[in-house]
Amino acid sequence: MSDWMEVLREECKHTSQNRMAQRLGVSSSMVSQALKGVYPGDLSKLQRRVEGELMGSSVNCPVLGEISTRECLDCQRRPFAATNAQRVRLYRACRSGCPNSQLERLNDVN
């Protein structure tokens, strides 16, 4: 079993799976199915969230500098907001080839 899964399992013993899912920003069914080994989808999103939130993993963001992998994933999910210069820079960076991004690269974001 991988380290991140063991960390998730241990944390869920100290709290509920529902609370852990909320903390990680994923559904409780995703956590439950992952722990049972029956989650049908890709677990890389959950892995990155566990590593960032519970294991202190970080990435170098071209806009914000060093941030947790959890914060990186949260930034990728944020919608475009022309009223906030930082959000514009994040939106563009996340979609124009950032090595940390799990989003599809868009050619017309600049």
Image (tube, helix red, strand yellow):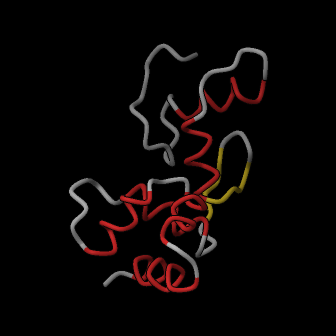
| Horizontal and vertical percent position of residue 18 | 51, 65
Q: Is 106 displayed left or right of 60 in the figure?
A: left
Image quarter for residue 110? Answer: top right
| Horizontal and vertical percent position of residue 76 | 55, 38
| Horizontal and vertical percent position of residue 4 | 44, 76
Q: Is residue 90 above or below residue 106?
A: below
Viewer-proximal residue, 17 or 69? Answer: 17
Residue depicted at 31% across the width and 84% down the height? 1
Q: Is 70 displayed left or right of 12 in the figure?
A: right
Image quarter for residue 38? Answer: bottom left
Q: Is residue 49 above or below residue 98?
A: below
Residue depicted at 61% across the width and 28% down the height? 91
Q: Is residue 77 above or below residue 55?
A: above
Image quarter for residue 39? Answer: bottom left
Residue depicted at 51% across the width and 68% down the height? 50
Q: Is residue 44 above or below residue 17?
A: above
